[in-house]
Amino acid sequence: MIEACMNRFWQTKVCAFVALCCLVSGISGARAESLYKQDFQSTESGKTPGDFLLLSGKFAVGKASSNHQLTLPGAPLDSHGAIFGPDNDGDLVLSARIRSEQKGRLYPSFGIGLYGLGGHILKVSPAKKSLELFRGRTSVMETPFDWESGKWTHLNLKVSSQNENTWSVQGKAWNEGAIEPKSWQINTTTKLAPTQGKASLWGQPYSGKAIHYDDVLLERPRSAASGHAAPFQLGIQTWTLRNLDFDAVVSFAKKHGIRNLQVIGKHIDPHADWEEIKAKKAILDTNGLRAYTFGVAGTSMDHAFNRRLFEFAKFMGIKVIIVEPRDFAIFDSLEKLVQEFDIRIAIHNHGLTSLYGNPIVVRNIIQHRDERIGVCLDVGWITAAGFDAAKIYRNYKGRVYDIHLKDKTVEVTNQKLVGISAHIGKGDANIKGLVEALTETNFDGVLAVETDSPIFARQPDDFIRSAKGYYESLVNP
């Protein structure tokens, strides 16, 4: 055992040396500018958000379980639409999730649109088993798509300019519980410039069943002209800022130009009073920051306790929660909540003495669970346990949903591997190999910079500057 650990240790040493000598690009800052976001939580039941203009249909917010959703009634059986948000201009990406049901052989259809009534609409047509792209009322192209009744369907529509005379229109859809397709299922170009107008939601409740809408997001993608565009984003795990209060964390993130925060309970407590949580979210929104995830989150055998965590995540717009349950049995509760809220969880790893320190244990857990249960790969701890971060990432086969960008120098003390905190890029972690693996697999998550060192945590400015310097050397070698 010790001999095997020593072999892994020296292999990691060699990989780290190569990483310092030959860096590659592959990481970038925030990929998109958020222009509009609506999860309907602040809209009173029975009402429509004030910025929505109904073209037809009685769209109104209703409450399903603990969550507000925009609902189009199952009658009348006609085509209905609503426009919202700012006037569309330039390159845009619109996303939303939509749910309805069939009744016998009767099916609904629904979609999202950009650039007004004459613009492009991405539409799911279950009766035709297809995903269709329209310009106005004209069908442009379609591709097969197997819709699942009663489940949420995620839709993404992107319109972007290729040059002065050509526009690219791309779309994709996937069912609740499936992994987002890496490639666009709809992909075409047009010489027709986008029309004027706003983003839109569409629905045809031909089955007589209501259609529900949630998590509407309009973004401006990063332009290729603005610099290197890479699939990952940089963030901060606020455990690194554990000596700062919430307001100081906000100031720190803005100062260092990092938008993505993986928050800990000290900075935003999921079990705090809702008014406190709402106030802190408003501060993040005002300052252009986002709590993209939370963790490592406390979990319990008490299902109600865990449910509050998911309700918090839903309100915050969090798509993945980082967990490290003290008992394997807790996953039964978490899996039910993952399925109910359509929010992922990612299992964090510490050293080999922890429950999840050995990747084999983690793989055995996730292979028997919902695909939305995956991994938060802590690069520092996986290195300290004698493993190669790139190899372990590949072995998880697409189930890594978050990464703690941490580095450690590995030493052998009393015939045991010991990890000592190091500045990012200065330890033994195979970060180069990991970056190559992330690039090859189109990983589009966040690398949250983190340190376990109390010394670095007392001087977080120096630590983050060093991490960003290494990060930028990867982007612009």
Image (tube, grey):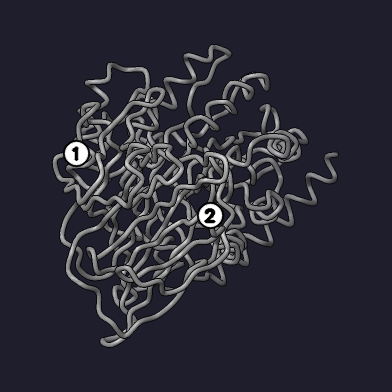
The N terminus sits in image quarter: top right
Which of the marked residues, 1 or 2, is nearer the chain's N terminus? 1
Note whether 409 is above or below 112 in the view shown. above
Q: CA distance from mark 1 to mark 2?
A: 31 Å
Type of amino acid at the residue the image marks with label 2: Ala
SS for dot 2: helix
Viewer-proximal residue among 427 and 238: 238
Q: Residues within 10 Å of mark 1 (few under 14, many from 20)?
A: some
What residue is rendered at 52% in x and 39% in y? Answer: 103
Viewer-proximal residue among 376 and 277: 277
What residue is rendered at 69% in x and 36% in y? Answer: 362
SS for dot 1: loop
What residue is rendered at 83% in x and 40% in y? Answer: 2
The C terminus sits in image quarter: bottom left
Label ID, residue 49: 1
User: Residue 408's x, y, as percent?
Assistant: 57, 46
Type of amino acid at the residue the image marks with label 1: Pro
Viewer-proximal residue among 272 and 236: 272
Q: Nearer the viewer, mark 1 or mark 2?
A: 2
Residue labelled with disc 2: 127
In the rendered picture of this protein, how many numbered marks are placed on residues? 2
User: Residue 318's x, y, as percent?
Assistant: 40, 38
Note whether 164 is above or below 471 in the view shown. below
